Image (spheres, rainbow, N blue to C red):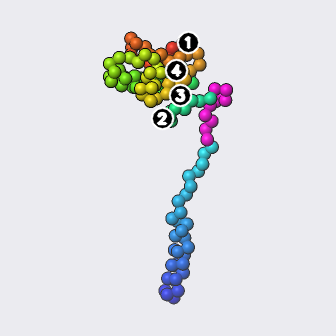
Amino acid sequence: MKSMNLPCLLAVVLMTAPVACRKRQPATTPPAPEAANPATPTQKLATGHVVPATVKEFESSVVLADLNKNLQIFLTQKQRLPADLNELARDSGMPIPQAPAGTKLVIDAKAKAVKVVPQ
């Protein structure tokens, strides 16, 4: 009787092995909408960061932090401020993102920082 159980057990193990080893596909979630308002499309940089749409979000964003980091590198290397944001963009290779509606980005010479100001 033992000799009959062994082939049956072996058959069960061999039949369930491929199922047990198969990787499960992660559940797919629907993509999140990129913008709450389709009239204002989101701007995505090459770094993968999405440019915030509001001034408050922009001022505390990684996008503005990156711009200021690039400005500090420019200051260290050239020992001067860039003439404008376009010169900073050319030197750093980082395109200047579009500022939130009703504002613009400027280089504040006194603070030596990129800031968001009303237009």
Residue 47 image label:
2
For the residues carrying marks 1 and 4, which lies nearer the camera in this image? 1
Q: Which region shows up in magenta? A: 31-40
Viewer-closest of 70 and 100 = 70
Percent across and percent down for residue 71 are: 40, 22
Q: Disc 4 designates what residue?
A: 56
User: What is the spatial separation of the Cα atoms under label 2 and label 3, in whole angstroms?
Assistant: 11 Å
User: What is the spatial separation of the Cα atoms under label 2 and label 4, in whole angstroms?
Assistant: 21 Å
Q: Residue at x 49, y 82 (%)?
A: 6
Q: Disc 3 designates what residue?
A: 51
> Disc 1 marks which amino acid?
Gln
> Disc 3 marks which amino acid?
Val
For marks 3 and 1, the one nearer the N-term is: 3
For marks 2 and 4, the one nearer the N-term is: 2
Q: Are marks 3 and 4 in contact (CB under 8 Å)?
A: no
> Disc 2 marks which amino acid?
Thr
For the residues carrying marks 2 and 4, which lies nearer the camera in this image? 2
- Disc 1 is placed on an element classified as loop
For the residues carrying marks 2 and 3, which lies nearer the camera in this image? 2
Which secondary structure type mostly characterizes the magenta part of the structure?
A: loop
- Disc 3 is placed on an element classified as strand
